[in-house]
Amino acid sequence: MTQYPQLSDAAPAELLNQAQNQDLIKGADALWRATHGDLNATAKGVVNYKQPVLETATALRAVTAGTASVTAPLLAAALKQSGGSWSPVECDGAAATVFRSLPGMSVRRFFGDMGNLPSVPNDGILSSPDIYISGPEPLADPAKLLTDWNRDCGIRPAGNRANHAYVRGLNMYPGTQEGRVYMYVASGNIVNNPKQWTPLKARDGRDYAMIQAANTGNIWYSTVPFVWTPPANQHMCLITRIETAQYPNPLPPGGVDPSSWVSNNPAVAWRNYDSLAGLRGTRHDVLDFGNTGSETGDFVIAAVARNLPEGLTLRLQSKSGGIGFDTGPVAIRQQRQEIIAEVTLPPGFWGQLEMSIEHPSGAPLAADAFIDIRCYRKVAPHSSALALPARAHGLRQALGASNDSLHLVLLGSFAFGAG
């Protein structure tokens, strides 16, 4: 394995300070969009700004944040091919540094998250403890977000009433840092498109909340809450996004796989978790799903259930738009069990998935009981960086097409848990 020279302790601070060159970041962002996400073409254009390799790498990393296909090795390769005067070792070192040091303001995607890029895959990645719902009343003292750092004390929002939501996180920047945090709401679904998200306003009327932290490793939190009135008995997702001078971090322009986007961007977090606490008898939940692509495609709807009590049954079905499937009631007999439905969807299709649970005994669920509803699209192998065999996505059950002929791309998921 090649060993690269270690950068000085001051390098990340110098790098981030230099990144305040907004002309460079704006230029890189314009090139990235104009080339439709071509990293090599963007790198060749950014070289014309004649900036040091660390600052150039920072700008490229900032404008491609949240893009799962852009990794440290690919960024290093783009720098080497850009026409810059840097050595291969300098390019490798710069790429490694920006993936280690950006962004400054990090929000936990799950407990134990320390801003790694990408994050370790985690079943709770869409259940951020740092999107904190206080309910109809704002917190009397937002410093509670600091004292409750190791606890997820957010409550289930009250339907048809104004609720208050806060955000907290860690400062990974080497020094004082400030930024803006934005929050969006999306309908409970397993396929997501940012164009359908609704931006929320903070209580002071702005569309963002200011955040600040004095030192590296300090906890920051929003003192002004966002206000949100969710419909009663309807699943909703909350998404938060942080931007700083060094890290513009725009929303993705099109459809997004939440797991990949959140995993590769520690300046965003997602909370779509819903509680199964007190489950007894019959429960029905409805989630949206669809085909946002331009062509007919084959899809997999999967429920991954863990640590549910024996005797409970789980059923997935849809009757939307003439697209029908029904798994029938499936009895839970294993600690980890999958319920799979495969369906072909025309372009532009959007429908509703019904999940039904029968729990006649009403026995309390285990603390780690969990149901993850996922939607995948079947694609050709190597068609994208996100195209993986079913087992690589954590699915063990055999599908209609072998993993040798088709792979899967995860489009989204929704989580239910006992807590």
Image: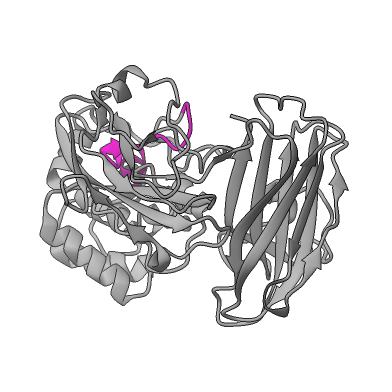
- Regarding residue 10, the answer to whether it shows in the image is yes
Residue 85 among those drawn in magenta: no
In-image side of 402 versus 184 (left or right)? right
Task: Tell me: residue 24, above or below residue 217.
Answer: below
- Classify 386 as above or below 125: below
Q: Quadrant of residue 132?
A: top left
Residue in view at x 69 percent, y 31 percent: 369
- From this viewpoint, is residue 86 visible? no
x then y, percent, for residue 276 = 64, 36
Q: Position of residue 3 (x, y in %)?
A: 43, 35
At x 62%, y 70%, the residue is 351
Residue at 29%, 58% (x, y): give it: 250
> At x 24% / y 35%, what residue is drawn?
222
Q: Is residue 44 above or below residue 108?
A: below
59 or 408, which lies in front?
408
Please say whether residue 104 is one of the residues in the magenta stretch.
yes
Instruction: State which region is magenta.
Output: 95-112
The C terminus: image quadrant: top right
**Name of the residue lying farthest toward the top:** 147
Judge by depth and name the residue closer to the eye, 297 or 290.
290
Count numbered badges in the picture. 0
Q: Position of residue 368 (x, y in %)?
A: 66, 27
Left or right: 173 in relation to 261: left
Give the quadrant of residue 409.
bottom right
Residue 313 location, quadrant = top right
In the image, farthest residue toward the front: 160
Between 277 and 89, the residue placed more toward the observer is 277
- The residue lying toward the viewer, choosing from 387 and 202, is 202
What x and y, as percent, mark residue 119?
48, 39
Colour option used = one colour
